[in-house]
Amino acid sequence: MPEQSLPEIQRNFAVDLFNLTWDLMEKSDRSQAETDQMIQAAHASRYHWGMVGEPVNLARGEWQVSRVYTILQRSDPCLYHAKRCLQITLDNDLHDFDLAFAYEAIARANLLAGDTTETEKFISLAKEAGEAIEDKADRDYFMTELSTIKY
C-alpha cells in the first residue's frame, strides 16, 4: 500500500468525519456518547478541511457544524457557525446550492435564537437563491429542506 501524504490523510479524515457526522445527525435514537461524537466529528471534519480544503469545503463544514447545533437546540454556536458559513460563501463568491444552504443555515439559527424577523429575511433570501439552483434534483432537495423551517 502506498504511503499517503499528510494532506491526503487530512482530506480522508475530513471526508470520513463529515460522513460520520451526517450519519449521526440522521440517527433518531442517538445516545449521549453518540451526540458527543457527532459534535466532535463535525468540528474535527471542519478542522481538517481548514488544513486542506477549498472554500466550498470550509463553507459546507461550517454549515454542518451549524446544523449539528440546530439539532441540539444550542442557538449561540449554531448562529456563530451559520454566520461563518455565509461569510465564507460570500467572500468566495460561492453560488447555487452553497449560497442557498448558507442562507438556510442563518434562517434556522435565527429561528432557534428566537429572532423571527431575521428568520423571515433569510428564508426569503434562501428561497430566492434556491430557485436559482441549476440542477433540478438539488433544487428540489433544497426546497424540501427549506420547507422544514417552521415558525
Image (cartoon, grey):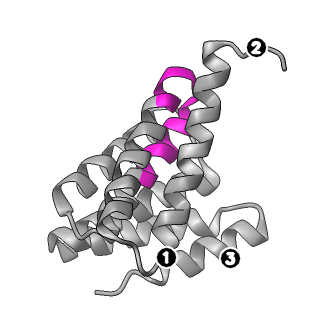
Do the residues bearing badges 3 and 1 touch, measured as CB atoms within 8 Å?
no
Spatial CA span between label 1 and label 2: 43 Å
Q: Which residue lies under the disc numbered 1?
A: 146
Q: Residue at x 20, y 77 (%)?
A: 116
| Residue 4 visible in the displayed image | yes
| Image quadrant occupied by the C terminus | bottom left
Residue 140, label in figure: 3
Res 23 quadrant in image: bottom right
- Judged by its main secondary structure, the magenta piece is helix
Res 102 quadrant in image: bottom left
| Residue 127 placement (x, y as % from top left) | 51, 72
Q: Residue at x 56, y 37 (%)?
A: 14
| Image quadrant occupied by the N terminus | top right
Q: Residue at x 50, y 21 (%)?
A: 51
Q: Which residue lies under the disc numbered 2?
A: 3
Q: Which residues are magenta?
A: 48-64
Q: Of discs 2 and 3, which sits in the foreground?
A: 2
Q: Of discs 1 and 2, which sits in the foreground?
A: 2
